[in-house]
Image: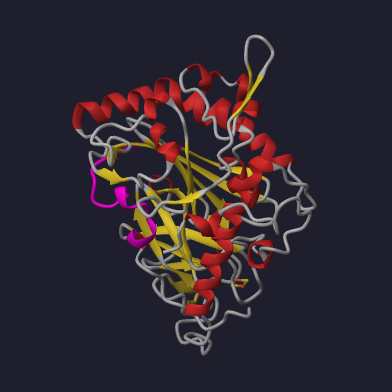
Amino acid sequence: MAGPDSLRWRPRAAGRQDWASWPHYDAAGNGFPGYWYPVTWGSHIDGTPRAFTICGERLVLLRDGGKVYALHDRCPHRGVPLSEGDQQFPGTISCPYHGWTYRLSDGKLCAVITDGPDSPICGKVTVRTYPVAERLGLVWVYVPIADERPHPIDEQLPEELVGNRFVVGGRIEPRRGNWRFACENGFDEGHAKYLHRTSLWRLFKPMPTWNVTSVIGDGRWIYRVQDEVHWEADFPGVGRWSNQRWWKRRPPKETFNIGNTGKPKKIDPTIAAQEFAGFASLSMPGVLRIVYPKFIHYEFYVPVDQGEHRYVGLMVNFTAGWKALGFYLKYLGGVRWLFHGQFSGQDAWMVEVTDAPPERLYRPDVSLTAWRNLAEREFTAKLEVHGCASS
Ligand code: FES
């Protein structure tokens, strides 16, 4: 695993105006294939076909026999979306135009309502299908690289979300702006205290002060330089320490409990900033994870196409029973509006109007370049595994 040195600020990225240092990232306007993506709440998918676009792929989702299926949302006959059709027979979906009917399990054309049961074209046409899983109350779809088999979804999820009991409050929204701008905004050190200075959420949770510049009472400026982004093996992706008071490390000094999971995490004692331990990280394929003492906040930035993404924001509390109910009521009663509404709306605004490259970077943008380095390195390694490193 790469150490912190590999993610330090690099002169080659300083002040760049293009994204030539990150060619795969530059080309990933529609997202990276080879990952599971959360699409919508499981409770929103029933026997009525619904259309979504993920990573530029048009999908139709529907539930049959309790299981969710995902197919390419295009009838091969004349290109009509299958999401406009319905279910004429169990285990199938029928196109509304001429009744071509496809098996949900493998996408094979199995009946043609307008050409009789012995239509010779049956079995000769197939619609692409996608692997589907349900976790955290969400429907996840795997977008493969070529014809690869998906890796298990539990290998991709943050480990604390596998095998623990928890309660989830969350919001899903289609949003304008490319998914990369959403990732970069979520992990952007320079924006938190400035863009969100008018958010009410700040009254309850002061903003992280990564690389903060602040003006104190007598007009002097305080500048705290932490120009490194650390790879920490116990956390996913790239991350930075924050100096928030409530994130202070608790004894014993080598461990502290994150997000109320009760599972101590090892901390590298050589990192001075851990005197004020707290953690925000960003991992592939676009998952922001911010640890608070009593919950962990996740944002999944799901690629739709060049101009849109889906925002999937979750607050997860690792409790059960009455405590879980209390957390959920608190979420519905205030946090949902304060954070997933007003605060997150400020982010959505910036993501929508960002237009880069070209760009001119400054020092706090080390978080952006560290994320791009991570994405570039991880996707390159993935392509090498699939024997298509040059693609
Ligand atoms: Fe789908 Fe004709 S376009 S059956």
Q: Is residue 218 visible?
A: yes
Front in this rendered view, residue 258 or 70: 258
Q: Quadrant of residue 55?
A: bottom right
Residue 99 among those drawn in magenta: no
Residue 64 in percent (x, y) is at 36, 60
Q: From the top left corner, tell me how far across and down residue 141 is, in percent.
A: 45, 61
Residue 72 visible to the viewer: no
Taking the image as shown, residue 180 lies to the left or right of residue 204, namely right
Q: Is residue 353 above or below residue 149?
A: above
Is residue 17 found left or right of 204 in the rendered image? right
Q: Residue at x 59, y 46 (%)?
A: 367
Q: In the image, which residues are magenta?
A: 154-170
Residue at the spot 60% in from the left edge and 27% down from the top edge: 193
The x, y position of residue 109, in whole percent, is: 48, 79
Tell how many labels.
0
Location of the C terminus (image quadrant): bottom right
Q: Is residue 73 above or below residue 359?
A: below
For ligand 1, which image quadrant applies? bottom right
Looking at this rendering, what residue extends furthest in the bottom direction?
Answer: 120
In depth, the one of 269 and 178 nearer the eye is 269
Q: Position of residue 99 (x, y in %)?
A: 54, 71
Residue lying at 46% horizontally and 75% vertically, measured from the top left: 107
The image shows residue 273, relative to residue 214, as above or below, that is below
Most distant residue in the left direction = 321
